[in-house]
Amino acid sequence: MARSFYRPTARAAEPLALRPREASEALGVSLRTLERLTATGEIDSVSIGRCRVYELETLKAYLLSRRESAKGGQS
């Protein structure tokens, strides 16, 4: 009789950072817009070797700041 072992399915870990194309898609902007936001310092990125990545928390903070500035502009 074959023994059956219960192995819980491994959950994929949520990524800590996204590559530029993934980050631009997550924000809903073009890659060029993301590059411009990075160049102007509106969004921070991290270099790991030759790869540039965008931390999820940084992207979320950027969206929150945009939401707050939009609310402030309305009367």
Image: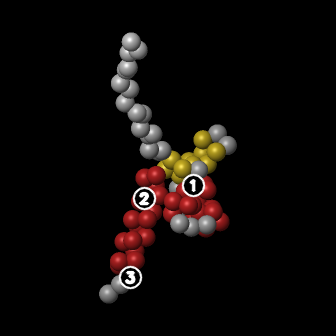
Q: Residue at x 59, y 50 (%)?
A: 19
Identify the mark at residue 60; answer none if there is no mark. 2
Q: Mark 1 or mark 2, which is nearer the start of the sequence?
A: 1
Q: Position of residue 35 (x, y in %)?
A: 63, 62
Q: Quadrant of residue 49?
A: top right
Q: Nearer the viewer, mark 2 or mark 1?
A: 1
Q: Mark 3 or mark 1, which is nearer the start of the sequence?
A: 1
Q: CA distance from mark 2 to mark 1?
A: 14 Å
Find the residue positioned furthest to the top.
Answer: 1
Residue tagged 1: 22
Q: Secondary structure under badge 2?
A: helix
Task: Kindly identify the amino acid type of the residue bearing the numbered disc 1.
Answer: Glu
Left or right of 12? Residue 47 is: right
Rendered view: 69 above or below 52: below
Q: Secondary structure under badge 3?
A: loop
Task: Kindly identify the amino acid type of the residue bearing the numbered disc 3.
Answer: Gly
